[in-house]
Image (cartoon, helix red, strand yellow):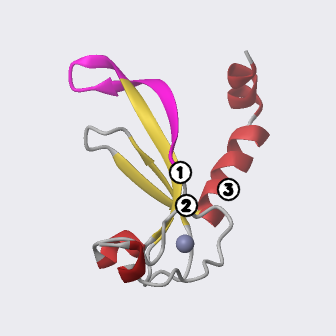
Amino acid sequence: MSDSEQRPTDPCPFPWCTTPHGATLHPDDEDHRSDGILVPATVRGADGAEEVELEVGLLRRRADDQTWLVVEDGTGAHLELTLASARRLRDVVRADEALAAELRS
Ligand SMILES: [Zn+2]
């Protein structure tokens, strides 16, 4: 596709979105996505502790009426939370004295 054949770029209302709207090849690629943040993590797998790289980002599919926080580990574990739920999780962890103390170190 030459520059003159590219579809026009739609303005995106989400400042975190890095999707090149109008320049993707598949309609599903037009979903609003942030760049993923990679976080090395140890998770409990079927055989015990496993080293993985979590990817955390924002996703808002074209049919969605809200934005989702997505956490996945590349091996099939996948969690999507509404932003309200993600904020509630953050607040509960911060407010719980024992949890907060363990996470401070
Ligand atoms: Zn977008």
In magenta stretch: residue 45: yes
Q: Please state the extent of the stretch shown in magenta in the rendering.
A: 36-51
Kindly indicate whether the residue at mark 1 contacts the one at mark 3 (C-beta within 8 angstroms).
Answer: no
Side of 49 where 57 appears, left or right: right
Question: Label 1: how many residues lie within 10 Å, few (<14), some (14-19) or many (20+)?
Answer: some
Mark whose residue sits in front, 3 or 2? 2
Q: Secondary structure at mark 2?
A: loop
Indicate the position of residue 65 as horizontal and vertical percent values. Answer: 54, 83
Question: Label 2: how many residues lie within 10 Å, few (<14), some (14-19) or many (20+)?
Answer: some
Ligand 1 shown in quarter: bottom right
Residue drawn at point x = 61 percent, y = 55 percent: 86
On residue 35, the disc is: 1
Give the Cα separation between the discs numbered 3 and 2: 26 Å
> In terms of depth relative to the viewer, which is nearer, 96 or 51?
51
Does label 3 or label 1 sit earlier along the sequence?
1
> In terms of depth relative to the viewer, which is nearer, 1 or 97?
1
Q: Quadrant of the image for the C terminus?
A: top right
Q: Is mark 2 within 8 Å of ligand 1?
A: yes
Q: What's the residue type where badge 3 is placed?
A: Arg
Residue drawn at point x = 37 percent, y = 26 percent: 52
Q: Quadrant of residue 102?
A: top right
Indicate the position of residue 41 as horizontal and vertical percent values. Answer: 46, 25
Give the Cα separation between the discs numbered 3 and 1: 23 Å
- The residue identified by callout 2 is 18
Q: Quadrant of the image for the N terminus?
A: bottom left
Q: What's the residue type where badge 2 is placed?
A: Thr
Mark whose residue sits in front, 3 or 1? 1
Give the Cα separation between the discs numbered 2 and 1: 6 Å
On residue 100, the disc is: none
Kindly indicate whether the residue at mark 1 contacts the one at mark 2 (C-beta within 8 angstroms).
Answer: yes
Q: Is mark 1 within 8 Å of ligand 1?
A: no
- The residue identified by callout 3 is 88
